[in-house]
Image (tube, grey):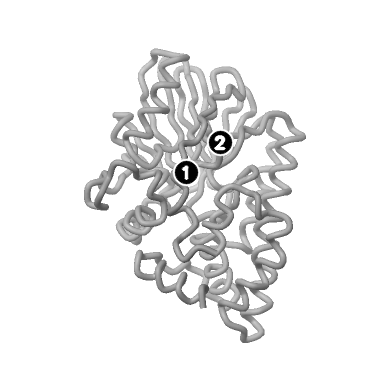
């Protein structure tokens, strides 16, 4: 295995797709890179997830302008991770929405996450030689706790917190008139879940809460758009399997007094046969094992990742 983080060598440009998943609802996807959602209302547009940099955000805007000239009025951020939010400036949206919990995580760990993700994902931050050159932290103008409704003219958009999963502050965005949902990284499709700031024991219940909506389509956090109830159902089940398959072997080792390296080996034995061909699998695995190990030992709040902690953890796993 490479002595660098897996994504350090992933510099190939990804093919972009722009898929309509309901009337005037679009999913911007790029082969396992972070996805962005687009909701076109009567008089304006809502963007879901900002991308990692203004340059990447401009690729989204180019696609938006291919289908509408309505102004972008809202930017919704499903959680605080840098690769999702640092492109916010490009949209010039007057209203930026996060859950209150997600905002609190920007306060608590946003600066450290910005530095850490800059080191992990050189391709997403291409053109920036120094972490201080990339945009500063993204702050919402509007927050909510459990639910919020936004009207884009007559089009209703419901924002909901359904439970902890990928982070403690994840939200989903539901458009009732088409019964379509944007889930952020709570749901992935043929892409590994990043669980380094996650809550393994809560995640499956949050997925089941999404399932109760019986939606027609989902724009997941990474991977292809999920169109049709059969594809949605498979993705929900598969995401739950990824999360539980990661946690179970790690918890067994951790609670038995084993080392992080032993937990890594056990996780690979369980997950490699099922998931090793998924996008960013090798990138996510060390962070997933480290977080699962902590959670199994009763650490409820994920420890903050810093560039220094990233490097130490990777050294420990390389042995």
The disc, 2 or 1, on the residue closer to the chain's N-terminal end is 1
Image point 58% across, 82% down: which residue? Answer: 259
Does residue 55 lie above or below 171 as drawn?
above
Disc 2 to disc 1: CB gap under 8 Å = yes
Image point 69% across, 71% down: which residue? Answer: 249
Q: Residue furthest right?
A: 230
Q: Residue furthest bottom?
A: 257
Residue 156 image offset from top left, x and y in percent: 52, 25
The residue carrying mark 2 is 182
* Label annotation for residue 78: 1
Residue 92 image offset from top left, x and y in percent: 29, 29
Q: Nearer the viewer, residue 118 or 15?
A: 15
Image point 40% across, 37% down: which residue? Answer: 50
Residue 123 image offset from top left, x and y in percent: 40, 45
- In the image, is 271 to the left or to the right of 293? right
Rate crowding at label 1 as few (under 14), some (14 to 19) or many (20 or more) other CA atoms within 10 Å.
many
Instruction: Report the Cα–Cα distance between label 2 and label 1.
Output: 9 Å
Does residue 70 lie above or below 297 as drawn?
above
- In the image, is 137 to the left or to the right of 219? left
Residue 81 image offset from top left, x and y in percent: 41, 50
Does residue 93 lie above or below 51 as drawn?
above
- In the image, is 104 to the left or to the right of 176? left
Q: Secondary structure at mark 1?
A: loop
The part of the image, by quadrant, that contains residue 134 is top left
């Amino acid at each position: 295995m490479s002595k660098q983080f897996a994504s350090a060598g992933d510099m190939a440009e990804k093919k972009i797709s722009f898929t309509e998943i309901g009337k005037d609802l679009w999913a911007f996807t790029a082969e396992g890179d972070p996805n962005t959602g687009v909701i076109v209302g009567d008089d304006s547009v809502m963007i879901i997830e900002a991308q990692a940099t203004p340059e990447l955000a401009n690729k989204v805007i180019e696609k938006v302008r291919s289908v509408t000239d309505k102004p972008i009025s809202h930017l919704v951020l499903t959680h605080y991770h840098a690769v999702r939010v640092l492109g916010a400036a490009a949209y010039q949206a007057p209203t930026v929405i996060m859950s209150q919990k997600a905002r609190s995580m920007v306060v608590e760990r946003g600066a450290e996450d910005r530095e850490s993700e800059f080191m992990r994902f050189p391709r997403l931050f291409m053109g920036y030689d120094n972490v201080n050159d990339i945009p500063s932290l993204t702050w919402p103008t509007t927050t909510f706790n459990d639910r919020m409704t936004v009207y884009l003219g007559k089009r209703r958009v419901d924002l909901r917190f359904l439970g902890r999963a990928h982070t403690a502050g994840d939200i989903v965005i539901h458009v009732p008139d088409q019964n379509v949902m944007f889930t952020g990284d709570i749901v992935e499709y043929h892409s590994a879940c990043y669980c380094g700031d996650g809550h393994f024991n809560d995640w499956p219940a949050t997925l089941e809460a999404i399932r109760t909506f019986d939606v027609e389509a989902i724009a997941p956090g990474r991977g292809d758009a999920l169109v049709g109830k059969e594809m949605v159902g498979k993705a929900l089940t598969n995401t739950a399997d990824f999360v539980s398959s990661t946690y179970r072997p790690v918890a067994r080792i951790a609670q038995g007094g084993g080392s992080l390296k032993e937990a890594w080996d056990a996780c690979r034995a369980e997950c490699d046969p099922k998931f090793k061909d998924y996008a960013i699998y090798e990138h996510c695995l060390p962070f997933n094992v480290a977080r699962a190990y902590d959670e199994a030992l009763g650490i409820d709040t994920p420890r903050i990742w810093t560039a220094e902690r990233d490097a130490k953890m990777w050294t420990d796993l390389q042995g």
